[in-house]
């Protein structure tokens, strides 16, 4: 009888220790919803420019017929910047062979996102040119907890105040694996913010995870790993 009492007391003691010990908590991430269309909003992760480009949106800087560089512009209204969609089959999305398109022109034809070959300094500019763009550029998929634009084989994006043919702009560039961000440029992620579409039907447009309001996300509260 004594031994059973001691055993019960021991169990209680162990329970007390267990309840006092810290418990592991799972990381939390900002809530997502879904849409067929989205804008791409810059989240600065290091070395912000001055003035800040945090929450700027991806737009285009035309340099010729059907050719444009990807740039960031101030997020003024819900229609600022370009509207994008993921183009491809479910298999394309699964195996990262889809592409990112955006409608343009008065008759609405597609323009695609592509990464230009590295120049002599190693910089890879991002273009939004008429046509299908480049496969291997898409949105992160499960199990990645954060939805963002990614390039297969790349290491994210950065933005710089650059002199372009018709004036300076905040140009978006793709970072290669192991590449250091140039001095004076900001590391960014491009996050999808849900948007209305252009009105043009997209037979191979895919529903995509996106955020209701990127600027409203308090990243100090959420995990980013």
Image (cartoon, grey):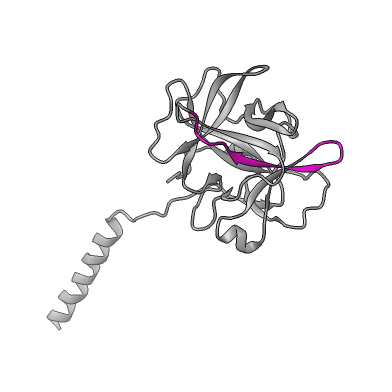
Highlighted range, magenta: 104-119
Residue found at the very far left of the displayed protein: 2
Residue 116 placed where, x, y %?
Answer: 56, 36
Give above or below for 113 relative to 91: above
Residue 105 placed where, x, y %?
Answer: 82, 36
In this rendering, position of residue 43 left or right of residue 179: right
Residue 117 covered by magenta stretch? yes
Does the image show residue 32? yes
Residue 170 placed where, x, y %?
Answer: 59, 23
Residue 97 covered by magenta stretch? no
Image point (39%, 31%), residue name: 180
Residue 103 placed where, x, y %?
Answer: 76, 42
Does the image show residue 215? no
Give above or below for 161 relative to 198: above
Quadrant where the N terminus sits is bottom left
Residue found at the very far bottom of the displayed protein: 1
Say which quarter of the image contains residue 53. Answer: top right
Image point (67%, 61%), residue name: 89
151 or 197, which is in the foreground? 151
27 or 169, which is in the foreground? 169
Give above or below for 163 relative to 145: above
């Amino acid at each position: 009888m004594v031994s059973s009492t001691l055993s019960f007391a021991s169990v209680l003691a162990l329970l007390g220790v267990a309840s006092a010990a810290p418990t592991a908590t799972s990381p939390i991430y900002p809530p997502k919803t879904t849409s067929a269309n989205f804008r791409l909003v810059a989240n600065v992760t290091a070395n912000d420019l001055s003035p800040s480009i945090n929450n700027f949106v991806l737009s285009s800087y035309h340099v010729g017929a059907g050719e444009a560089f990807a740039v960031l512009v101030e997020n003024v209204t819900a229609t600022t910047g370009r509207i994008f969609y993921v183009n491809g089959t479910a298999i394309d999305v699964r195996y990262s062979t889809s592409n990112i398109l955006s409608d343009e022109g008065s008759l609405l034809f597609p323009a695609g996102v592509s990464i230009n070959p590295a120049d002599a300094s190693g910089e890879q500019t991002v273009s939004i040119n008429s046509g299908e763009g480049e496969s291997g550029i898409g949105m992160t998929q499960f199990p990645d907890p954060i939805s963002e634009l990614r390039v297969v084989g790349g290491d994210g994006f950065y933005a710089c105040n650059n002199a372009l043919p018709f004036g300076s702009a905040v140009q978006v560039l793709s970072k290669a694996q192991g590449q250091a961000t140039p001095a004076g440029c900001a590391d960014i992620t491009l996050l999808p913010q849900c948007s209305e579409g252009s009105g043009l039907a997209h037979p191979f447009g895919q529903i995509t995870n996106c955020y209701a309001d990127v600027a409203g996300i308090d990243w100090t509260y959420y995990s980013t790993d």
